[in-house]
Amino acid sequence: MNTSFEMMQLYLAEFIIEKDPRTQHFAMIKDGPYSVIGYLTIVFIFVQFVGPFFMKSKPGFDLRPLMLILNSLIFAVSCAGMVIATM
């Protein structure tokens, strides 16, 4: 247990000291992993608790036609990319 905690501290210290200079202008990454963890925690709380509370009495959406269009578009673009790549 103690060695895994020490390893975690070592990795975090290395993460903070040896930053990638290409990511210094990224808002969520420049302060370390804590801002990303906080953001993901907020999203998780919203998805698991707040969203279902507000949508409890509302009917569900029928996304089947939209998903069919989206998947067809992705399939067509993928096929076009494969054809172009083999030329």
Image: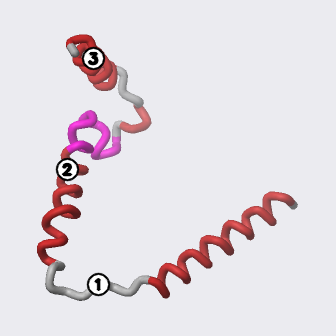
Q: Any mark on residue 60, and which? A: 1
Which residue does the numbered mark 3 point to in the structure image? 4
Quadrant of the snapshot with the N terminus? top left
Element type at marker 1? loop
Establish if 57 lies above or below 83.
Answer: below
Cα gap from disc 1 to disc 3, whole angstroms: 45 Å
Establish if 25 lies above or below 15.
Answer: below
Q: Mark 3 is on which residue type?
A: Ser
Magenta: main secondary structure: loop
Magenta span of residues: 25-37
At 28% from the left and 23% from the top, the residue drawn is: 12
Establish if 82 lies above or below 18.
Answer: below
Q: Quadrant of residue 26?
A: top left
Which residue does the numbered mark 2 point to in the structure image? 41
Cα gap from disc 2 to disc 3, whole angstroms: 23 Å
Q: Mark 1 is on which residue type?
A: Gly
Q: Residues within 10 Å of mark 2 (few under 14, many from 20)?
A: few
At 66% from the left and 70% from the top, the residue drawn is: 77
Element type at marker 2? helix
Foreground residue among 62 and 33: 62
Residues marked 1 and 2 touching at CB (< 8 Å): no
Residue lying at the far right of the rendered structure: 87
